[in-house]
Amino acid sequence: MKNCKIRSYKDLIVWQEGMNLAEACYQLTITFSREELYGMTSQICRAAASIPANVAEGYGREYRTEYIKFLRIAQGSLKELETYLLLSARDKVRLTDTEAVNPILMQCESLGRLLRALIRSLDNKESKE
């Protein structure tokens, strides 16, 4: 999407990657036991969906400072998601295994870098105005 005009939050790579991450989390939680439907499954899916949702909501805000605020909320949801994923693979919880969680954690790292870069870019634009 380089050199492409951003017309919508849907054009943002950070939103697209957030959607991919959420989708991967939904796929992972399908393998969890039914007893976890209202527990860890719900928590993981909620945190994962919150990331692109906050990117979209921030994009729709009128002021750059509000946009940055929602991107930071997305970062918080990302860290929350990472925590749930790590917990779900711990030996005494064992809803899944580390082999299933590691690729998703790598997506989390990548998305975290994109979020930080976008925030820095918006911060820099604000300070120049």
Image: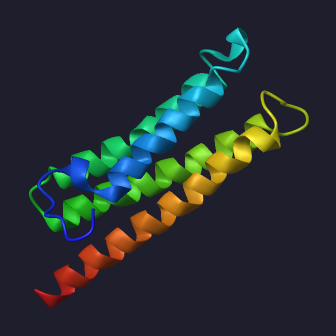
Residue 88 is left or right of residue 20, and the answer is: right
In the image, 14 versus 59, the foreground residue is: 14
Query: Furthest-right residue in view?
Result: 91
Residue 115 is left or right of residue 35, and the answer is: left
Image quadrant where one finds the N terminus: bottom left
Question: Compared with residue 29, is residue 13 higher up or lower down, i.e. above or below?
Answer: below
Q: Quadrant of residue 25?
A: top right
In the image, 53 versus 103, the foreground residue is: 103
Q: Position of residue 39 (x, y in %)?
A: 64, 21
Image quadrant where one finds the C terminus: bottom left
Question: Compared with residue 69, is residue 113 higher up or lower down, i.e. above or below?
Answer: below
Q: Position of residue 112 (x, y in %)?
A: 50, 62
Q: How many marks?
A: 0
Residue 44 is left or right of residue 71, and the answer is: right
Q: Position of residue 12 (x, y in %)?
A: 27, 56
Q: Residue at x 63, y 25 (%)?
A: 29
Q: Position of residue 35 (x, y in %)?
A: 71, 11
Q: Residue at x 46, y 57 (%)?
A: 75
Q: Residue at x 20, y 71 (%)?
A: 3
